[in-house]
Image (cartoon, rainbow, N blue to C red):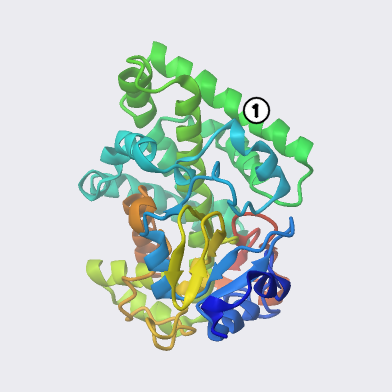
Amino acid sequence: MTSSQADVSDLESTAVPFFPIPRAPGCPLDPAPELAALQERAPLVRVRLWDGSTPWLVTRHAEQCALLSDRRVSADWMQSGYPFHSQFLQDHHEEGQFLTAMEGPEHLRLRRMIARPFTPRIVEQLRPTVQQVVDDHIDALLAGPKPADFVAAFALPIPSMVICHVLGVPYEDHDFFHRAIRTVTSSDVPDDVVSKSGGELYRYLAQLIGRKLDDPDDDLLSQLATERLATGQLNRHELVMLVLFLLVSGHETTASMIALGTLALLLHPDQIAVLKDADGPEVAAAVDELLRYLTTVQPGRRRVAVEDIEIAGQLIRAGEGLILPEEIGNRDESVFPGAGVLDLRRDAGRHLAFGFGVHKCTGQPLARLELQVVFAALFRRIPTLALAVDLGDLPFMDDGLGYGVKEMPVSW
């Protein structure tokens, strides 16, 4: 009997427990070895979640791209069978949807409202601003004590300042929303604490929107408030959820990538040499390779089939969940030979760090710009940058939606 003819109950009975799968000791930048083993086993494998459900884990690049661009696959977490990563999210998902969990006309409507400030042409105009932010933080790092926590002194504040500038959020409030975002995306925080932090963040943004309506400025939040909210194209709840999505996606993931990317380069000094000699296009290509090699989102992209789909010899039935982890799609040897090796000269343009299809990250031009400026400047200005502790002593965030380094003492 072929896999497509196999009895579903047999497949479910052999499902592999999934998420969180701890990374191998001593290999904090690599996917869990169990994921690589599943990729070698088959392009689609049943896995078992916290609630006993058994969605499909899509292990390979080609199938991930095919399904992420298939109209029969939905990101809408209101759909029956959606594979939630936690009890809390399942219990509270009806309170509001992020842009990444919408489909069809509603997704397109909201996406178009925020698209213009994130077009490559508009984002490129921010390069001098981002360069100044990066240079200022390098100056502060060099002038400060040694060792320094690279995460707190550099990786976190840079994307915070940039997304605050774009949105029009007062930067002096960044400590508050950083703590709140970290709380609501962590899997080991009690539900009542998550709810409390989520409520505080929601109220803060609602009040800020009110201030923007009364006293607009030249920023995205003022634009959305005056052109979309005031005209009835958005209600206040929709706008709060949209801004919250932009804050989370524009802050946490980029900060994690700056820290993880710097760590990866410190562990591969031959690649630092490549970066120091790189020009603009070469720096952009190097950033793509870092995005391919590293992963800042842990539980995989979540989807649900809304119609039956046959792919890779397997039948996915309507109502069955899908999990598509980019960290193994980006390590697929059939697409990226020698995928376990960091090679900044590689053509890594097909990576899945920003997703694929209609839900590909709207803010990717801004994230790319920030990473290009950071990695072009950091090792040229601080060529002796080095870890101040052993790799095994670094604490990693592996308990929530995001993956990254909590603290990274460095010296020079």
Instruction: Tell me the residue at 60%/84% (across/down).
Output: 37
Q: Is residue 336 above or below residue 166?
A: below
Q: Kindly tell me whether residue 117 is visible in this rendering.
A: yes
Image height check: is 239 above or below 144? above
Q: Assign a secondary structure to mark 1.
A: helix
Camera sees residue 390: no
**366 with respect to 201 (left or right):** left
Mark 1, residue position: 200
Closer to us: 63 or 406: 63
Query: Quick one: 143 or 292, which is closer to the camera?
Result: 292
Rendered location of residue 293, percent (x, y):
46, 74
* Residue at the spot 59% in from the left edge and 56% down from the top edge: 402
Q: Amino acid at mark 1?
A: Glu
**Nearer to us in this view, 309 or 243:** 309
Tag 1: Cα neighbours inside 10 Å, few (<14), some, or many (≥20)?
A: some
Q: Position of residue 312 (x, y in %)?
A: 44, 77
Tell me what residue is drawn at x 39 percent, y 85 percent: 334
Q: Is residue 70 above or below residue 275?
A: above
Within the image, what quadrant is residue 229 found in? top left
Q: Position of residue 380 (x, y in %)?
A: 37, 69
**Nearer to us in this view, 148 or 120:** 120
Quarter-wise, where is residue 28 in the image? bottom right
Left or right of 317: which side holds 187?
right
Is residue 362 shown above or below 387?
A: above
Quarter of the image where the C terminus is located: bottom right
Residue 128: % across, % down: 28, 47
